[in-house]
Image (cartoon, grey):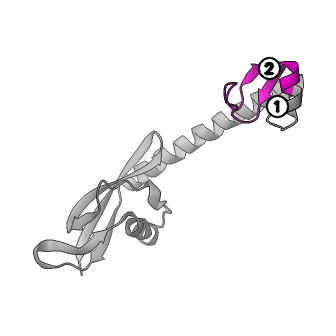
Amino acid sequence: MKVILLEDVKNLGKKGDIVEASDSYARNVLLKKKIAVEANGRTMNDLKLRTANDEKVAAQNLEDAKALAEKLAGMHITLKVKVGEGGKLFGSVSSKEIAEAVKDQLGIEVDRKKIQLGSPIRSTGEVMVPIRLHTAVTAQLRTVIESL
């Protein structure tokens, strides 16, 4: 029996795959647990429409990420922190503080988990901070660290 998988199934296939399964396994396990649906004309058409919609959404997300990356490339943020002797910071500047500064100064919401600092910033000056907006798009944000 041909079925369309609604979830990943170990040793059978991934979500959205059309696979051949024995009649008893398909009826007693896959269809009963609603892990799969029988592959007929209507469900095949639904699968085609769903995949086309998913591709369209993915392309739109990529375009949005590219536009945001271009917008961020021309901007900068300034963070004022306490500084000790020799320009060393008391503590460090974290991705959470950078995300808050981007929201306050630029009005753009950026998830702190997408800010990719190799190591925390511990000195004053200008730093280029990479922000991963999409799997294929990484923006560079100019960040200026100043003393209070």
Q: Quadrant of residue 127?
A: bottom left
The C terminus: image quadrant: bottom left
Residue that carries the numbered disc 1 in the rendered image: 30
- Looking at the rendered structure, the kind of residue marked 2 is Ala
Label 1: how many residues lie within 10 Å, few (<14), some (14-19) or many (20+)?
Answer: many
Q: Which residues are magenta?
A: 1-26
Residue toward you, 126 or 7:
7
> What whole-number distance in Å separates the C-alpha atoms at marks 1 and 2?
9 Å
Determine the secondary structure under disc 1.
Answer: helix
Q: Is residue 4 magenta?
A: yes
Residue that carries the numbered disc 2 in the rendered image: 21
- Looking at the rendered structure, the kind of residue marked 1 is Leu
Say if mark 1 contacts mark 2, CB within 8 Å.
Answer: yes
Determine the secondary structure under disc 2.
Answer: loop
- Give residue 51's position: percent from left, percent from top: 70, 31
Q: Residue 39: in sight, yes or no?
A: no
The N terminus: image quadrant: top right
Is residue 75 placed above or below 64 in the rendered structure?
below
Q: Residue at x 16, y 79 (%)?
A: 84
Q: Residue at x 23, y 67 (%)?
A: 122
Is residue 68 placed above or below 12 in the rendered structure?
below
Residue toward you, 108 or 35:
35
Q: Is residue 92 left or right of residue 52?
A: left
Mark earlier in primary sequence (1, 2): 2
Q: Residue 79: in sight, yes or no?
A: yes
Q: Residue at x 45, y 39 (%)?
A: 136
- Give residue 23's position: percent from left, percent from top: 87, 20
Q: Quadrant of residue 53?
A: top right
Q: Is residue 70 left or right of residue 83?
A: right
Q: Residue at x 44, y 72 (%)?
A: 104
Query: Farthest residue in the left direction?
Result: 86
- Give residue 143's position: percent from left, percent from top: 30, 63
